[in-house]
Image (cartoon, rainbow, N blue to C red):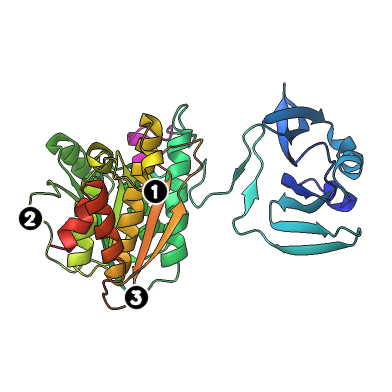
């Protein structure tokens, strides 16, 4: 473990699960930082609800790890720029060392440690400079770093699915708004993965759509177009669609996007819901197990959002999709952090419908996707 601490490419060290019950700190995270232009490591040590910090000179890190971490925690992970080394310590003191390549190559950047994303600082997506995410010299604009992380996370999730894709790919992006994501997805598919991709972005705002079409023309994105349409009312594309994206489509607009995907037998769905008011506005006490969660406004609001996504996921399962409900980004960066990643795999069923219908009837609320698909 001391040997690992002596390398100069450490991105993060994480120690957790103490060997002894009387250990002072439940978890320790160490990261490289730059303080007043001087490199050092900062340890964040968690004790109950409190976090304590200590700055460690690089030449002292190895001894510090030996004193505070080695033999103290059952699992210690060293994340390097190109690999991950894990030390597992048993209650009897036996240490097992495991090593594997890093899932994504990581980089150190002073006080802002980050993974080396698929999209990287210094090599901006051209359109994102016009949209205000990057500066012209490739730096992330102050105040847009959370947006940059969200975009990168979305691209990573797409990459898990499409990195080996061959042939054509047609994607619909619902509620694209300023289209940060739409331009990035097009860039990723065509420029980075060299996929023959066509993307259509829908939004209700005509001026936004006109601006995005002008930007697509400016950069020669011939297979990227935007249309003004309301997903809940207007006729949408009848061509074959392979994937539907819905990032932060507001309230029931997400349900209409998912309904479109189901009715058009779309194979891939990537949806991050937003502004989920429908259930919260209609649910009421039903003299059942959920009543205790409906007494307080903020609890009711959060439960309603989770209930909405659970019903959407169960409904999509009934429609033959394999559904992963996953964390999109860390909650610290966005409260809209649940993604439904769906792949069409099988035949439809109604295994979940009865349970959902029972909840709707007992608590008197509405859920648009379920009702659209179970008329």
User: In the rendered structure, are the residues bearing label 3 and label 2 in contact, judged by CB atoms less than 8 Å apart?
Assistant: no
Instruction: Identify the residue shown where x is 24% and y is 37%.
Output: 281
Magenta span covers which residues? 127-135
Q: Is residue 366 left or right of residue 235?
A: right
Q: Please tell me which residue lies in front, 118 or 327.
A: 327
Residue density around tag 3, few if under 14, some if 14–19, many if 20 or more, within 10 Å? some
The C terminus is located in which quarter?
bottom left
Q: Is residue 270 left or right of residue 135?
A: left
Give the percent coordinates (x, y) of residue 166.
37, 74
- The CA span between labels 2 and 1 is 41 Å
Residue 235 numbered mark, or none? 2
Give the percent coordinates (x, y) of residue 124.
44, 42
- 3 vs 2, front mark: 3
Q: Please tell me which residue lies in front, 76 or 289.
A: 289
- The CA span between labels 3 and 1 is 34 Å
Residue 361 is at least partly visible in this image = yes
Magenta stretch: includes residue 196:
no
User: In the rendered structure, are the residues bearing label 3 and label 1 in contact, judged by CB atoms less than 8 Å apart?
Assistant: no
- The CA span between labels 3 and 2 is 27 Å
Q: Please tell me which residue lies in front, 264 or 112.
A: 264
* Residue identified by numbered label 1: 289
- 3 vs 1, front mark: 1
* Residue identified by numbered label 3: 345
């Amino acid at each position: 473990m001391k040997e690992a601490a002596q390398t100069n490419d450490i991105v993060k060290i994480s120690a957790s699960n103490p060997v002894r019950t009387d250990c002072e700190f439940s978890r320790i995270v160490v990261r490289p930082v730059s303080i007043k232009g001087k490199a050092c490591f900062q340890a964040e040590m968690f004790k109950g609800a409190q976090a304590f910090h200590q700055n460690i000179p690089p030449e002292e890190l190895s001894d510090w790890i030996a004193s505070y971490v080695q033999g103290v925690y059952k699992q210690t992970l060293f994340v390097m720029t190109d690999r991950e080394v894990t030390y597992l310590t048993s209650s009897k003191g036996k240490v097992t060392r495991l090593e594997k390549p890093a899932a994504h190559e990581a980089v150190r950047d002073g006080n802002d440690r980050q993974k080396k994303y698929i999209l990287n600082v210094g090599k901006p997506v051209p359109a994102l400079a016009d949209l205000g995410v990057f500066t012209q010299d490739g730096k992330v604009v102050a105040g847009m770093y959370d947006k940059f992380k969200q975009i990168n996370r979305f691209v990573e999730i797409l990459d898990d699915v499409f990195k080996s894709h061959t042939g054509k790919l047609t994607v619909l992006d619902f509620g694209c708004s300023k289209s940060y994501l739409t331009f990035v997805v097009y860039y990723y598919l065509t420029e980075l993965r060299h996929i023959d991709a066509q993307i259509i972005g829908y939004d209700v705002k005509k001026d936004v759509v006109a601006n995005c079409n002008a930007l697509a023309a400016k950069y020669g994105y011939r297979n990227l177009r935007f249309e003004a349409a309301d997903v809940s009312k207007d006729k949408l594309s009848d061509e074959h669609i392979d994937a539907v994206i819905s990032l932060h489509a507001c309230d029931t607009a997400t349900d209409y996007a998912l309904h479109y995907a189901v009715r058009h037998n779309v194979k891939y769905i990537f949806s991050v819901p937003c502004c989920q008011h429908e259930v919260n506005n209609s649910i009421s006490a039903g003299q059942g197990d959920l009543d205790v969660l409906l007494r307080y406004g903020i609890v009711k609001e959060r439960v309603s959002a989770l209930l909405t996504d659970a019903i959407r996921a169960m409904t999509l399962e009934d429609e033959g999709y394999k559904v992963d409900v996953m964390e999109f980004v860390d909650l610290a960066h966005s409260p809209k952090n649940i993604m439904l990643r769906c792949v069409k795999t099988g035949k439809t069923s109604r295994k979940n419908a009865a349970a959902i219908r029972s909840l709707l009837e007992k608590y008197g609320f509405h859920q648009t996707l379920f009702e659209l698909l179970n008329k």
